[in-house]
Image: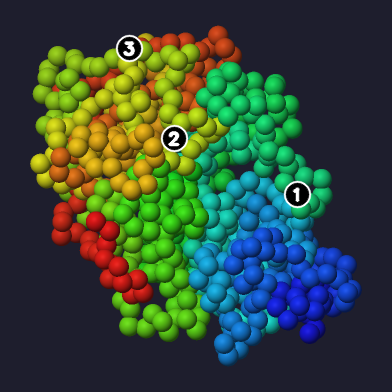
Amino acid sequence: MSRPNGSVTWRGLAPLLGLGLVLVSGSGCERTQVSAAPCEPTAEPPTASAPAPEIADPNQETARFIAHNYVKREVRIPMRDGATLFTTIYSPGEALRAGAPALPIMLFRTPYSIGPYGEALPDKLGPQPAMMRDGYIFVYQDVRGRFMSDGEFVNMTPQIDDKSGPADIDESSDTYDTIAWLLDNVEGHSGKVGQWGISYPGFYAAAAVIDAHPALLAVSPQAPIADWWYDDFHHHGAFLLPHLFNFISSFGRARDGHTQDWPARFDHGTPDGFEFFKRLGPVRNANERYFHHEIAFWDAVMDHPNYDEFWASRNLLPHLERVSALGPAVMTVGGWFDAEDLYGPLHIYAALEQADPSGRNSLVMGPWQHGGWARTDGASLGDVSFGAATSLEYQAEIERRFFATTLGHPVAAEYEGCAALPEAYMFETGANRWRSFEQWPPNTQARALWFGPDGSLREQAPEDRPRSFDAFISDPAHPVPFTSAIAKGMTREYMSDDQRFAARRADVLVYQTEPLTEPLTIAGPLSAQLWVSTDQRDADWIVKLIDVLPDDAPDHEGLREGMHMGGYQMMVRSEVMRGRFREDPSAPKPFKPNQPTEVTLPLQDVLHTFGVGHRVMVQVQSTWFPLVDLNPQGWVDNIYAAREADFVAAQHRVYRDAKHASGLRFGSLAASEGQQPSRCRVGETPAQ
């Protein structure tokens, strides 16, 4: 079988495995119209006596399936500026084609390595096992500057809207050039391309929507990064210390040419992240003790504590908002309990909706951790049960169907007669059921719950004329932990964890309603309206929305030993703001000591029902360690340059009088809004 254009083909089909034979393509190269550089062969062709391809885990059924049904081919795809990107193509054999002469291409671009390289075969392909068995041409690519690809890697590559020549490259152009090459050089495709990616690869999928190649018909950014001032490493200017530290200590190491290997993981020397980062002290010590200015992106973060052009240039949302007509159908996916990228999915969907309201743009939000829809069955998270395997339902009902029907895959016939996929397919936590909406956010009734005396939380706004407040001492030497678990960094479960450990601290303010006499469903965005003061000049403000279960709430199957659900304080949503950025993230402003100041903290969207007998609770605090780095509270221009002497205890106040009312604003959903989506492939009733 002849393969032009500089590639190596590793045959994964069972008969060839049995013979110990690997067929290899030729090494000739061709150029396409948009690609100005020749491609190159990626490896020396093996001889006919080469051993059979190695399977990463031969005991896994999926690995054996891939070996019997897919052919692996490695190529270098030329970009318009001359760089070549290392790419692996897995083409289905005749058994999967089932008489179909042409199949769609599914593209995945990542900075995290597309290994295994060479003859070894992976133990999974595609977004989910069913799609692997359906048979697509799966294409995996190391993005520019990572692992085996040429070029310089740039984190969150800035988008160039007006390109003047081949030197103007970004992720949109690299994707375009990749698709153009695939259409010219891959056999047996239908001319239709889909793309997906989770987390950082989700950013690359979202960027592909801008100036999209005409053949790109279906894109699913999943847990995509949109803006690193609100995703991953920052939340409203507050720095999520262990998340960047643990990630960039390996990911951020410069490579020495092409490589197939990850740098070594950082060794904390202890499983206790709280103690490790407490001993680290001020963030400036990270370079002095560990990084030694060898990690360029860490240094860049330290040099840009405010939202300046460095961060603004990496914000994808303004470029998505300028898409005049949405080419591909887009299905953005996120998890309500995604500790890393919750901002991205909600705002990428909203940006595309604003850009082209008539385009095929949809949103799916489930009760998942980061990537949980692909990595877990979605039946639970930590101690919280969702009543059913939500990930499996999503995969069958939504994801497989979206790609099959949009790309014209032969299995699309299985969905004939099904109702159209909804605009928004959302899981309602608390009630544990899927709901569909014609728009997101849905139509809601504006409501509020206000802080009152004695820790009360009530719908009636405060009427007290005298200044009323609750106070606490925030001491950086004794910060509030973000979890009761022993962990080196951000835990997957913290966004649904029991908050009783925090409620019992003197430096956490707690407000809660009486037990509800009727259900309350909160839907869409919500925000905390706070009136606060400090006797210092800076402070962080953390607000948590919590569902307090009745004392007699039953335990569920699978609950970890020693845990009980009676009185469980389930975190539904939480957010933090660095107070200096309360007015403008690009212009930090100190507080005037002891002067009441308004702080509005947007929290991300929710869809949650507080049941009868439950209480609504709000907690307010100023440390959340080590999830968020410590605020010195004494004023420094750059917190990342603060020294030990700058960290001081402070008295903070949260006001709750008529002139300075503090509380939570949200939208409540009427029972008539939204509906339970009809099922097409899975005949289960909604989880109750």
Q: Amino acid at mark 3?
A: Asn
Q: Quadrant of the C terminus?
A: bottom left
Query: Badge 3, how many Cα within 10 Å: few under 14, some, many 20+?
Result: some
The location of residue 473, given as percent across then percent down, is 36, 13
- Give the mark toward the camera: 1 or 2: 1
573 sits to left or right of 100 = left
Disc number at residue 236? Answer: 2
The location of residue 45, given as percent across then percent down, is 87, 71
Using the image, determine if residue 20 lies above or below residue 207. Answer: below
Disc number at residue 349? Answer: none
Q: Amino acid at mark 2?
A: His
Q: Can you tell which quarter of the image residue 676 is in?
A: bottom left
166 sits to left or right of 375 = right
Q: Earlier in the sequence, mark 3 or mark 1?
A: 1
Disc number at residue 261? Answer: 1
Is residue 222 visible from the viewing direction of this image? no
Q: Quadrant of the N terminus?
A: bottom right
Residue 13 versus residue 312: which sits nearer the camera?
A: 13
Q: Are marks 1 and 2 in contact (CB under 8 Å)?
A: no
Residue at the extreme bottom: 99
Q: Amino acid at mark 1?
A: Asp
Using the image, determine if residue 213 lies above or below residue 513. Answer: below
Residue 592 versus residue 419: which sits nearer the camera?
A: 419
Is residue 492 visible from the viewing direction of this image? yes
- SS under mark 1: loop
Task: Give the CA separation, mark 1 to mark 2.
Answer: 35 Å
Q: Residue at x 30, y 36 (%)?
A: 564
- Count of marks, rendered view: 3
